[in-house]
Image (cartoon, rainbow, N blue to C red):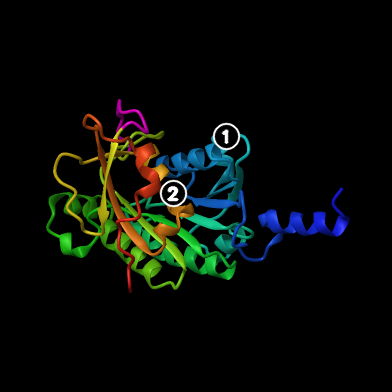
Amino acid sequence: LKPFWLKLALFFYFDHSCWPITPPFCVHAMIAVIGAGGPTGLECVRRLLAQGSPVRCVVRSPEKYSGKFAAGAEVVQGSVTDEASMEAALKNVSGVVFAASASAYRGAGGPYEVDYLGVEKTIKAAKANGVQKFVLVSSRLVNPANKWHPIRMLLNNIKYSLMDYKFMGEEALRSSGLAHYVIVRPGGLAGGEGEGSHVRPTDIQPGTQYLVAGAAEADLGGSARSIHRADVAMVVCEALTSPDAARKTIEIVARPPAEGEPSIKEQLAGVFKAIPEETT
């Protein structure tokens, strides 16, 4: 039998909740998903739980999402517009997935408050808790260099300057000083649960497509223009654990695999290797 002091030491080492900051080799450490009630956030929650990771779902109104999340998920209140609530919600977590986005045209739930200031406040809350891993789900075409692209122009007008503020949120993360930040830019989100024009039904089964990936502003070709939200969640989860992912921005879409090509599940392990690390 192990002596009591050794048992106690092992308990404190492997139970993330006992650490004020994330231990370097902590297993099954808690991951907070911001915007867990949205279609992309929900897929991230499901993927993390399937991998055996404890998950904390951070939502504005826990009562609204009663019964929505699978058993084992912790649900807490937190609003990205309220830094104090985010600081409380991120206590004793090892990583953050920011999958929230504006729910209103402007105002408290609009892009400025959520996609820009919300990211900034969540970064501050993460740093206050010693959290270094932060994955931001953004979008393709957010860079103002694409300002005349018709899709960007459309999305920028559906919600007031949505793409502009998403890019400002990205820039806040790049300049945050966090050791392991990752920005995931999917294009043409499809699938997932929810209602509204932002949720596009699809017959594509998650995990069956070929992932087309590149660095920020990469030309991913014209044949692949969308990606299932569950496949985005796969990339997000890989971003949390892969040492190759730190300080990188990745753009992703997917298409049916050609004969002999691997599926997304088979591509994941090496997906970040060819993406250059950002120096800013």
Q: In terms of secondary structure, where does tag 1 sit?
A: loop
Magenta range: 199-208
Q: Position of residue 274 (x, y in %)?
A: 30, 56
Q: Which mark is residue 70?
A: 1
Identify residue type, mark 1. Ala
Q: Residue at x 43, y 56 (%)?
A: 135
**Is residue 247 one of those drawn in magenta?**
no
Q: For this rendering, which residue is in front, 74 or 209?
A: 209
The answer to which of marks 1 and 2 sits earlier in the sequence is 1
Q: Residue at x 48, y 66 (%)?
A: 123
Q: Position of residue 127 (x, y in %)?
A: 54, 69
Q: Is residue 108 visible?
A: no
Q: For this rendering, which residue is in front, 71 or 153?
A: 71
* 206 is higher (above) or lower (below) than 159: above
Q: CA distance from mark 1 to mark 2?
A: 21 Å
Q: Residue at x 35, y 42 (%)?
A: 267
* 276 is higher (above) or lower (below) than 140: below
Residue 258 located left or right of residue 112? left
Q: Residue at x 43, y 72 (%)?
A: 176
Check if mark 1's residue and mark 2's residue have beta carbons within 8 Å. no
Q: Position of residue 160 (x, y in %)?
A: 27, 57
Q: Position of residue 155 (x, y in %)?
A: 23, 51
Identify residue type, mark 2. Glu
**Predominant secondary structure in magenta?**
loop
**Is residue 205 one of those drawn in magenta?**
yes
Q: Which mark is residue 224?
A: none
Q: Within 10 angstroms of label 1, few (less than 14), some, or many (20 or more) residues? A: few
Q: Which mark is residue 238?
A: 2
Q: In terms of secondary structure, where does tag 2 sit?
A: helix
